[in-house]
């Protein structure tokens, strides 16, 4: 007879889910007993790190990824990271241990009371299995729900005595064999309408979002822009977990500002705004104004019905972005509109001591390997990174669309684990490092060859910018005078160095990126916001 544990691992194995991220407790040990040799357990030392690593791994591998957390406190620690995973559309199958069934009603120590309520509303589905033998079916269902569009995290609470129970082999066989696919094609009539609107528009513009990349629509977006002579903008940076269009491409114009009034001002002169693979829009801060420029209409293509429904303006087509753009290309020919204007190359930032965030990003751009992947959590230098480095390959940029710090360092470890042959560079503020600092342990222990570039500006720079914007004076807690991240990294077993100036920075990065091991480079930068 087969046990719940054997059947569950068989199900994971059949779906290629053999890398699991976790932090164990006593309630999880029965799941981990005799851990199969063909599985990898990646230990994170705190649950926000566990989920962040799994998020990067799931997005990069494209597969649902198993996470195992320690009953209520483990889930509690993970909540901020689960929030990010939801915003990132990251397919995580999150499991947590639970007390044995016999003592749950008396609420013995470690019982997760109302376990399925706890991660709501951040997960797509949350469940505690009614009978032990149903665990494999619940995990099967969880995997399908996580992977169906819009992808996202799901949660299953599993009492610790369930793993030894025996299953119905026939039923489990069906659960393991099932395939469920969710790439929906758009209504052909709507696609023809859109093609007509696009061809007839005088000055259409394409706005590319993260799901272009996640759905594999990158080449279709490029083809559409080239054929229709479309200028292309990226959605506002805070909501953009991935890049949907090559930022060094001649049609690319830049990153849209994140607030209502300046965003519509930027699109002025366009009569049709085509948004692909994004919500419309993830605005912040609030600067009221018209949602669209005078005379413009908008159409969004998204695989997420909720994104479509909640948009404050425009029409939407709910369907797979890649399939829809591919079909749209069948309907549109070469345009005779003028080619869009070309964005100038990035400015050379003025010299300063310490260097500006822009100069640090320019130095990074100078040593950037063509196939490198960026994981970004450097609030005051994100705009400078986008402008200076101009990532132009798919699946090469990851950012917390939810805005919760702690994603960057953790996710970078997961991205590198899923892509061992591509260089991964995490660019991160010294404040942000602290939210997931123990990811350094996993990077060292699992020999993850990640490069971490820490920008040390001795403050929460972006919050000082917000304080000015919100006309808040006298707020405490915005300075970080002496945080030595390089020494902290040493404590976790990561080789590190502190540098000053672009020359030292360039040479440190040139050593670290191809070194084949985890290295941290900390550079001093001037306080402030760096937009160029
Ligand atoms: C979990 C979480 N807590 C707090 C914040 C608020 N927050 C946004 S940016 C920021 C400062 C980050 O500092 P640092 O990484 O040094 O970057 P800098 O702004 O200096 O570039 C903080 C605290 C957040 N986004 N997420």
Image: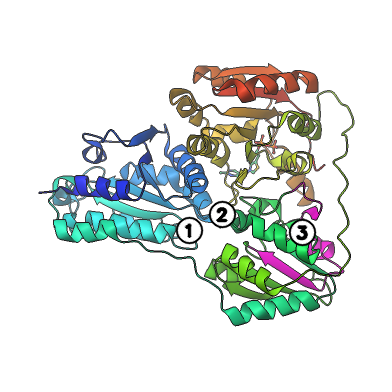
Label 1, label 3: how far apart the Cα atoms are: 25 Å
Q: Is residue 471 left or right of residue 70?
A: right
Compared to 313, does 14 lie above or below? above
Work out whether mark 2 precedes mark 1 in sequence or the reverse, and give the earlier one.
Answer: 1
What is the distance, in whole Å, between disc 2 and disc 1 at their CAs? 10 Å
Q: Position of residue 22 (x, y in %)?
A: 37, 38
Callout 3: CB less than 8 Å from ligand 1: no
- Between 444 and 281, which is closer to the camera in this rendering? 444
Horizontal relation, residue 153 to residue 41: left or right? right
Under tag 1, what secondary structure?
loop
Q: Which residues are magenta?
A: 247-276
> Could you classify mark 1 by the number of other residues whose Cα lies within 10 Å: few (under 14), some (14-19), or many (20 or more)?
many
Q: Which mark is residue 214?
A: 2
Residue located beneath label 1 in the image: 151
Can residue 260 be seen at all in this image of the molecule?
A: no
Residue density around tag 2, few if under 14, some if 14–19, many if 20 or more, within 10 Å? many
Residue that badge 3 annotates: 232
For image coordinates 59% across by 79% down, the residue present is 188
For this rendering, which residue is in front, 520 or 341?
A: 341
Between 523 and 328, the one lying in front of the other is 328
Residue 189: which quarter of the image? bottom right
């Amino acid at each position: 007879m087969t046990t719940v544990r054997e059947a569950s691992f068989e199900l994971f194995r059949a779906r290629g889910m053999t890398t699991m991220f976790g932090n164990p407790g006593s309630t999880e040990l029965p799941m981990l007993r005799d851990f199969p040799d063909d599985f990898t357990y990646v230990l994170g030392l705190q649950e926000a790190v566990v989920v962040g690593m799994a998020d990067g791994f799931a997005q990069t591998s494209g597969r649902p990824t198993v996470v195992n957390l320690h009953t209520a406190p483990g889930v509690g620690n993970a909540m901020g990271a689960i929030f990010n995973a939801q915003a990132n559309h990251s397919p995580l199958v999150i499991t947590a241990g639970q007390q044995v069934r016999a003592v749950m009603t008396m609420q013995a120590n470690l019982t997760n009371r109302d376990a399925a309520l706890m991660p709501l509303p951040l997960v797509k589905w949350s469940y505690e299995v009614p009978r032990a033998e149903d665990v494999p079916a619940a995990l099967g269902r969880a995997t399908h729900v996580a992977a169906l569009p819009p992808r996202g995290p799901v949660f299953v609470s599993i009492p610790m005595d369930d793993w030894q129970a025996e299953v119905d082999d026939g039923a489990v066989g069906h659960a393991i064999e099932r395939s469920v696919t969710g790439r929906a094609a758009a209504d052909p009539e709507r696609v023809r309408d859109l093609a007509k609107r696009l061809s007839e528009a005088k000055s259409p513009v394409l706005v590319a979002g993260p799901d272009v990349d996640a759905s594999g629509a990158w080449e279709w977006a490029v083809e559409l822009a080239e054929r229709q002579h479309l200028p292309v903008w990226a959605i506002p940076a805070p909501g953009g977990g991935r890049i949907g269009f090559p930022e060094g491409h001649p049609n690319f114009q830049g990153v849209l500002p994140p607030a209502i009034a300046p965003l519509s001002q930027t699109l002025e002169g366009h009569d049709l705004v085509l948004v692909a693979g994004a919500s419309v829009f993830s605005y912040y801060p609030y600067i009221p104004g018209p949602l669209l420029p005078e005379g413009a209409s908008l159409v969004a293509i998204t695989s997420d019905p909720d994104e479509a429904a909640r948009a404050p303006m425009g029409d939407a087509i709910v369907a797979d972005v890649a399939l829809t753009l591919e079909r749209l290309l069948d309907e549109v020919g070469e345009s005779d509109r003028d080619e869009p204007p070309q964005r100038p190359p990035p400015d050379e930032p003025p010299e300063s001591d310490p260097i500006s965030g822009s100069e640090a990003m320019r130095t990074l751009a100078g040593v950037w390997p063509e196939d490198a992947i960026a994981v970004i959590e450097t609030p005051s230098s994100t705009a400078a990174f986008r402008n200076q480095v101009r990532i132009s390959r798919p699946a090469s940029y990851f950012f917390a669309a939810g805005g919760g710090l702690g994603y960057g360092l953790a996710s970078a470890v997961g991205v590198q684990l899923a892509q061992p042959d591509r260089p991964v560079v995490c660019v991160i503020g010294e404040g942000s490092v602290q939210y997931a600092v123990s990811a350094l342990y996993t990077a060292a222990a699992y020999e993850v060859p990640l490069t971490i570039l820490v920008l040390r500006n001795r403050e929460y720079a972006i919050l000082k910018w917000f304080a000015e914007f919100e006309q808040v004076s006298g707020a405490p807690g915005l300075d970080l005078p002496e945080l030595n991240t390089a020494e902290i990294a040493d404590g976790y077993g990561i080789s590190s160095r502190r540098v000053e100036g672009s020359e030292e920075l360039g040479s440190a990065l040139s050593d670290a990126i191809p070194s084949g091991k985890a290295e941290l480079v900390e550079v001093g930068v001037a306080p402030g916001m760096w937009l160029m």
